[in-house]
Amino acid sequence: MAFRFRVVPEKTNFDFFRAQWLTFGGSMMLTVVAIVAWMVMGLNFGIDFRGGTTIRTEAVEPVDVGAYREALSGLEVGDVAITEVFDPSFADNQHVAQIRIAPLDGQESVTEDTILAVEQRLKEIAPSITFPSVESVGPKVSGELIWKAVIAMVAASFCIMLYIWLRFEWQYALGGIIALIHDIFITIGIFAIFQIKFDLTIVAALLTILGYSINDTVVVFDRLRENLQKYKAMPLKDVMNLSVNETLSRTIMTSGTTLIALGAMLVLGGDVIRGFTFAIFMGVILGTYSSVFVAKNLVLFIGLDRGDKPKKSDKSEFANVDA
């Protein structure tokens, strides 16, 4: 007899509405906190959105942020932010820093002469220093990127809502889209609270979260629709509980294996993709949670029209058909 490992029992009977004041109510409260944090603290926009130049350096010598800053103090540049980058994958003699330089007032971007002068000053501090990447973005381009990112998020959300509306009913569409907004806003709130760099790769991660989260929600909704046809006399809340329990094994296995891969990328992938991976990692957790505790609760609150269910009768559906 073959051994089959099960993370979740084949049949479960959890009551997902038992503590909805804590699960659903807590989610709504976290969403509000995330929005407030976003508005008050703002996001730590990367070079894609702020404009300026980011220089990545690597050297054998340890990074001395104070010495780097002093070397650049005499140059005519805007605000300078220097941060040392740490990563478990770096070698013992690999010391990495990231230098962000804002253009002077009235300038569109940092000039090539200024970048060369910065590199020359840094070579005097660390002779082995190299510059693997230099990225420059003008303020006009960065402003356009912000609007395009917003438009992409809104357009994706609208298309998803339209798809669910056509596939199911408007109550499902509204519940699903609010659950997606819950996932996105809390993820953005985490980035605002911890001031994690927010750039175009994070926008790509948020769009990925939209697709992943709605996929899990649609699985639950599809089972709910089937069970509503099978159990016409069962209360809506009980049908929802049954539907989530029947898809729980699939939900946990899919999310679990995805998180294992994302966890490996988060630890070993390096600092370049860490923000992107972290955003998707949090999005998968939030998307799974919202599929189980948020989306169906919203549909229950809105209510479904079950008035088309047939009355109980012993007659066949063909009884009134003329021969």
Image (cartoon, rainbow, N blue to C red):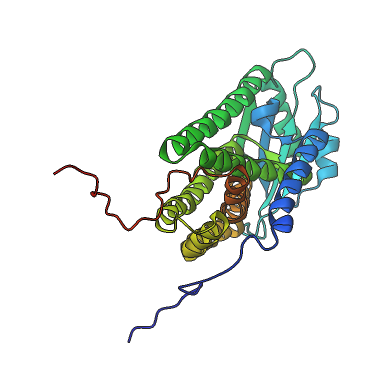
Out of 83 and 189, give the one closest to the viewer: 189
- Where residue 72 appears, as percent x and y from the top left, is 81, 32
- The quarter of the rendered structure image containing the N terminus is bottom left
Give x and y (percent) for residue 68. 80, 40
Q: Residue at x 54, y 54 (%)?
A: 236
Left or right: 146 with respect to 123?
left
**Residue at the image point whose x is 67% and y is 60% from the top:** 92
Most extreme residue toward the bottom, as rendered? 1
Residue 125 can be seen in this image: no
Q: Nearer the viewer, residue 30 or 114?
A: 30
Q: Quadrant of residue 133?
A: top right
Residue 161 vs residue 131, the one in the foreground:
161
Image height check: is 39 above or below 273? above
Q: Quadrant of the C terminus?
A: top left
Q: Is residue 24 left or right of residue 157?
A: right
Asked if residue 72 is positioned above or below residue 213 in the image, the reply reads above
Q: Nearer the viewer, residue 243 or 87?
A: 243
Residue sitting at x 66%, y 55%: 87
Where residue 182 sits: x, y (%)? 65, 43
Q: Residue furthest left?
A: 323
Question: Is residue 299 in view?
Answer: yes
Residue 298 % position (x, y)? 61, 46
